Image (cartoon, rainbow, N blue to C red):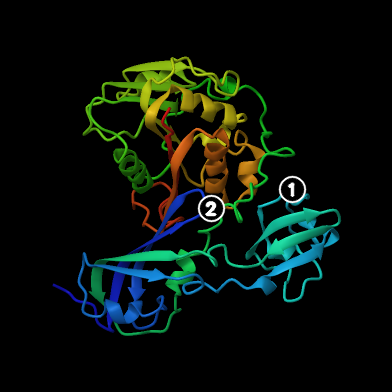
Amino acid sequence: MNRIDTDSKVDLLFQLKWKSGDATHTDCFQANHANVWRDLFPADLNERLMGRQGGDDIVMTFGRGQAVPPFNTRQLMEIKRRQFDAERLGIEQSNPRLGRFYPKGLLKDVTGVFSNNIAPFRCVGINNGHLSVDFNHPLADKDLRLSTIIGKIESKQIERGGISIDWMERLTEGPGMQARWRQQVSDYVTGSAFEREDATADSVFYQKPRFTQHLDGTALSLVENTYNRFLGDGMQVLDLMSSWQSHIPVRHRLNRVVGLGLNHSELDSNQQLTESIVQDLNVEPKLPFPDDTFDVVLCTVSVEYLIDPLTVFSEVARVLKSGGYLVVTFSNRWFPTKAIQLWKELHEFERMGLVLEYFMQTRAFEDLHTYSMRGLPRPHDDKYFPEFVYSDPLYAVWGRKKSS
């Protein structure tokens, strides 16, 4: 069996786990063909990889500021409101929002910041004509646990140049943005947040069935694996905003699977459903079920279309049994004209923060988690390959209904 040496190229699955004040987070990244000799790895991981073989798991812990730049109070600044110039980068949202992230390049007259800088900063205070901004890495004040799972090992060919990849930098590009800043509620809901380009009824948009896959095969398998951890034989499940597929693992013998969606033909084609209901949650968010009905509620690549998500999440909490789970999954693909304006403005990791905020503001859930998976290869038979070589990223947020 191959073992890693300095001439190896290896597939590595990084799993970064950390906690914020409100949730537990797991952010994963698949590093394919990592060059052991040339690439950059966190701390002494390079040395610990030597002699390892496929299937081995290396676990490391990092105190605050050991894996990413440490928190620096000098990176907390106060600037004038006029220095926040959203039009500079063509960003529609011109008013800064508390807790939100923006690219540094929209700031004017800040030392060391140039217009092409897309690195994020966070608005953490608004006081009359001034803003407080945080330039620190979002994970700067977090303890981190890194698991590195070793996959395929190959001997590299003759070295012919190339770039050196900093894998920890790539892994931590985004994680942290889904958490509140110092328990401060992020301002996601003011202004035109829930307006949509196409404001016509969703029933019109979905009048014709859409028998399409919204994610590639690899991402859909991840959705199924995610749901698998919450399902068991005999359960009653609600597939919220359902379609012609529910992505429920077939291994489970569920007692009842109700699909609530917008198109009769799609729901009738879904072989996993035991019953179906056509209902537009943006017209009638109240769910037609008694209290404490379902063990699990699933929502797949649809949360971005809700214009009254807090009411819907409250309704989900009502129809869930005590201890039941709501699991929400999404990616970076959607119908642009029907997604809420806010969804389009947010960084991909901030979108998890938005959904997490839905859970928290409902006040009915505990044991909150976020999960992300990036970097997996896209199937070669996917219609977007080779234009996009990586699989669609998967993001998930889930929580358990509090006991009565």
Q: Left or right? Give the position of 151 relative to 120.
A: left
Foreground disc of the pair 1, 2: 2
134 shown above or below 100? below
* Circle nearer the N terminus (1, 2): 1
Say whether residue 61 is visible: yes
Q: Are marks 1 and 2 in contact (CB under 8 Å)?
A: no
Dividing the picture into quadrants, the one containing residue 75 is bottom right
Where's residue 98, x and y in %? Answer: 70, 51
How many neighbours does mark 2 have within 10 angstroms: few (below 14), some (14-19), or many (20 or more)? Answer: many
Element assignment for label 1: loop
| Three-letter code, disc 2 | Phe
Where's residue 1, x and y in %? Answer: 13, 72
Question: Label 1 vs label 2: CA separation?
Answer: 19 Å
Name the residue nearer the viewer: 360 or 200: 360
Name the residue nearer the viewer: 348 or 291: 291
118 shown above or below 161? above
Residue located beneath label 2 in the image: 349
Dividing the picture into quadrants, the one containing residue 403 is top left
Residue at the spot 57% in from the left edge and 44% down from the top edge: 354
Where's residue 114, x and y in %? Answer: 73, 71
Where's residue 209, x and y in %? Answer: 46, 24
Marker disc for residue 235: none
Q: Left or right? Give the position of 193 relative to 284.
A: right
Which residue extends farthest front? 404
Residue located beneath label 1 in the image: 92
Element assignment for label 2: helix
Say whether residue 156 is visible: no
Residue at the spot 49% in from the left edge and 18% down from the top edge: 287
